[in-house]
Structure formats: structure tokens, C-alpha cells
Image: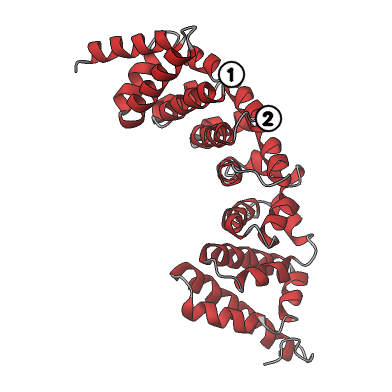
Amino acid sequence: MSAVRVRETLLEYLFEAQSDSHEVQQKSLQTLASITKVSPQNRTLLAQTNGAISALLTLSKSSSPIIQTLSLSILFNLSLNPDLKQSLADMETINHLNSIILSPSSPESSKLASSLVCSLAMLDKNKAKFGVAGTVRLLVNTVSGPRSPAAHHLLSSLAELVQFHGNCTLAVRAGAVPVLIQLVTSTDGEDLAGTSLAILGLLARFDEGLNALKKTDQVVSSMVDVLKGRCMLSKEGAAEILLLLLDESEDCLRDALRLPEFFTVLADISVRGSARAREKAGQLLKKMMEANLDSYSDGHSSIFEW
């Protein structure tokens, strides 16, 4: 089908999507969602159609959950094209996505709004916009509340946004570190722990995040508990954070040396862990052994008993 014919077809479905008939709206939006899901060219052609983005944004504010969900699905599909991310991320759209995350009409709308935030934030130029619009604080506040069906999507969006230093600062000031630590250590949050640890690792690249981690009560023992768990992604994240903490904080190093099981846990991971986990465990073992030897050379009794 020629581009001209495709454009005409898209325009026809877009017109029907604005019908007064809910059934016609739903059917046309379902077709547009299918068409834009499979073809980058169709996404570009729809985005270039006069008034398409504003119409979809209006439809995404519908009181009907299904109309809202379908409209968000199409906008998400459009955001998959790298050249459309910047134009889609205007402040009106960002503020609307914030409002959906704050008060979703359905679990699916919350997932889609979060996914759209994540997709748009993959363009570095857009990251600061979300920080200015309050999205970072909103995400932190939302994941700190009752468990949401969209929790994974919310955390993925936060992980993308905090790769920008300014957003890292905003996240720390919004209380992200204790919130994420709580998710990591929660007995019913193991499925979210890996992503939470990845975000903590991103925050710890900068002084604000690292200082907040160092001030967290029993952070070393919490990370060691993660190392004892079953999730390899979580183990990798915890080992990365421990390396940062032990490099930067003598207090954290002393706390680690006081944990008699730490060496055994690291030895186990260095043999049975993933390649990345084995690498990090090896680095931690080396650091612990050097610290233990230093305690002997200083004439003090070793804290770490073999």
C-alpha cells in the first residue's frame, strides 16, 4: 500500500476515533493501535497527520477506561520511534501522564502511562523535562505507597530518569533511598528488589545518593541479606552497592568486617553466581582480605575471624 493510501486510511480511522459513538471510537482506536504497533513507518505517518497527537491526547483523557487505554497504547507505539520522542514529550503530555500515574482509571492505564514516561525518557533531552514537571518525586511517592499493579513499570521509569544527575538529586531529596531499601528488604517485594537495587546503584554514582546510602541504618547487613537470597539480579546489584559503600566509608567497611557470614556468602557467589556476580564477589573478597590484613599490620586484633 502506498504511503498516500496509508495516510488516508490513518486519517479515516483518526476521524472515526473522535466519533460520538463509543463503539466506533473503540473499534477505530483498536485498529490504529494494531497498525502502529507493527510499523515504524505507520507511526511516522500518523504522527505527521495534522491534529493526530492532540486528538490522541484528548482521547487519553476519556472517562472510559478502554478509550483511555487504547489512546495511551497508540501514543506509546508512536514513542518507539526515536525521532518522535522529543515532539511527544511536551509539558502538556508529561503533566497528563503524571495525573494518570497519580490517579489511574485502571491498572492498565497506570502501566501504559509509566511505560510511556520510560520510553520518552530514553531520549536524554527529555529527562530534565520530567524532573521539572515533578515526575521523579511522583514516582518515588507512588512506589512508597500500597503495592501497585504497575510497580515494575513505575520503577523502570524511575530507573531511566535517574540516569540524569539532576533527577538523581530530586529522587534522593524525595526520599528515594529509604523507599527503595524498604522494597529491597521487604519479604513480599523480592520481584521488585532487582530493579530497586539497580536504581540505588544509579543513585550511588553521585554524592547525594551515596551519602544517603551511607547514612542508612544497617545498610551493609541489608545488602548482605540480599546476597543470601535467590535472585541473581538482586545479588549483582547488592554486590555493586557494597563495593561503592566499602570504597567510600570506613564505617561501612567495619560493619562488613563484623559480619561473620559475609566471607562465606561471598565465597559461595564467587563459585556459583553469574559472571557479573562472581566478578563483584571477587572484588569484595579481595577488599575484605586486604582490610583484614591491615588490621593485623596495625597491631590490632582482627575483627574478621577466619
* Residue 305 coordinates in the image, percent (x, y): 71, 91
Real-space CA distance between mark 1 and mark 2, rounded to the nearest whole angstrom: 12 Å
Neighbourhood count class around disc 2 (C-alpha, 10 Å): few under 14, some 14–19, many 20 upward: few
Residue shown at the point (29%, 12%) measured from the top left: 9
Q: Is residue 145 above or below residue 81?
A: below
**Viewer-proximal residue among 120 and 254:** 120
**Quadrant location of residue 213?**
bottom right
Q: Nearer the viewer, residue 284 or 225?
A: 225
Coordinates of residue 152 in the picture (x, y in percent): 57, 47
Q: Is residue 142 left or right of residue 150?
A: right
- The quarter of the rendered structure image containing the C terminus is bottom right
Q: Is 42 left, or right, of 94 in this rendering?
A: left
| Residue at left offset 66%, top offset 80% | 262
The amino acid on which the numbered mark 1 sits, given as a three-letter code, is Lys
The percent coordinates of residue 80 (x first, y second) are 41, 32
Query: Looking at this view, is 2 or 131 the one in front?
Result: 2
Asked if residue 168 shows in the view, the reply is yes
Q: Which residue bears the numbered disc 1?
A: 61
10 left or right, relative to 286:
left
Residue at disc 1, secondary structure? loop
Q: Percent position (x, y) of residue 277?
A: 51, 70
Note whether 141 is above or below 7 in the view shown: below
Which mark is first along the chain, 2 or 1?
1
According to the picture, the residue beneath numbered tag 2 turns out to be 103
